[in-house]
Image: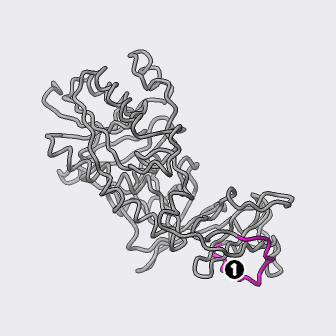
Amino acid sequence: MSNAKTRVVVAMSGGVDSSVAAYLLKKDGYDVLGVFMKNWHDTNVTISKECPWLEDSYDAMLVAEKLSIPFQVIDLSKDYKKKIVDYMFEEYKNGRTPNPDVLCNREIKFDLFLDIAIKLGADYIATGHYAQVTESKKNNNSLFHLKSGKDKSKDQSYFLCQLNQFQLSKTIFPIGKINKKDVRKIAKKNNLITADKKDSQGLCFIGKVKLPDFLQQSLKPKNGNVVLIDKYFNGYKLYSNTKEINITSQKIQYKKSDGEIIGHHNGAHFYTIGQRKGLSIGGRVKPLYVLSTDVVNNIIYVGEGSDHPGLFRSSLKVPTSKMHFISDPKKIEVKNLKARIRYRQALQDVSFTKNSENYYFNFKNLQKAITSGQFIALYDNEELICSGVID
């Protein structure tokens, strides 16, 4: 059956992945339209030599010309500021660490962009994500499943953990079954200008950003104390690669008197748990890591070394209202439930309990730098079944 009458609008970022996605769709005979989303204008906080949006949009246009597909740029900067940037500011202000890529996919690419694509006559949208969508039938109704990409080192299903059934039903991931090295081979073989372009490490469709400068657009510097917490806290050795005393199953509420003031910072809301860079405090035997932040009293608690017990937890909770199920809510009851709390993390063994207010996730192994505001994604083998915002 011919695909010529099936229109697919491709989100082209100017990178090799979306370029090859567009190429494969064109090769398969689809009616393809390339669209670049312009989400940010302020170059004061972007590292322009790394990933300027103007260069990216130009590269996307050149690929579209090479493929002989129509191309256009759409400006979503107002919506991006409202739905992503303002939310980020509010979360950091409250001592939480949001994931802008997950939010961008939920609110921009697979919501606003999808709506625009449908108005342009699209049957589907496509992106260069390393993920897969499959379809099954239940009571003669279609169920869509989000699965990991074939290339496990590049799997991006985590970033898609907030998508819903309608969004998945309208989405194609052309490179989901391809390894990254083969994606570059396809690009080189077809002389696509993005074939050797480095992968973007920045915010969704913005580019690489100086996060402190980005946050200081809204959050003002505020001098506060940096407090060092010893590995022996309240007389207990919290953790030393053994389970001598497991008090890491709940968040530890430090007080200023629990440690020693060793320096100052410019605002607790600029820091996140597990952070190493940006403390600017020397003279320590081991590097310092942020263990906790107190934005109310403007205090940062730190510990020496990446093995500091204060960095580790064995459980976390998600409010019931913050849980999102992609297909069947009962799928979470599988025996071998796995979880991921950050991109590219190996899947972790996890179990859960719940009540009317919260889900409590308990890990087989201690987890490093669990951070409120981030997402936990739950898997049944290759399928991402649900996700939640960590409290």
Apparent side of residue 108 relative to residue 355 in the rendered image (left or right): left
Please name the residue shown 30% across and 57% down the image: 79
Give residue 326's position: percent from left, percent from top: 34, 57
Please name the residue shown 15% across and 41% down the image: 120
User: Residue 341: which quarter of the image?
Assistant: bottom right
Residue 95: in magenta span:
no
Give residue 331's position: percent from left, percent from top: 39, 59
- Magenta-drawn segment: 249-264
Please name the residue shown 25% across and 23% down the image: 28
Give residue 315's position: percent from left, percent from top: 59, 69
- Closer to the camera in the image, 68 or 345: 68
Apparent side of residue 249 relative to residue 210 in the rendered image (left or right): right
- Closer to the camera in the image, 267 or 373: 267
Residue 253: in magenta span:
yes
Type of amino acid under label 1: Tyr
385, above or below 297, in the image: above
Where does label 1 land, which residue? 254
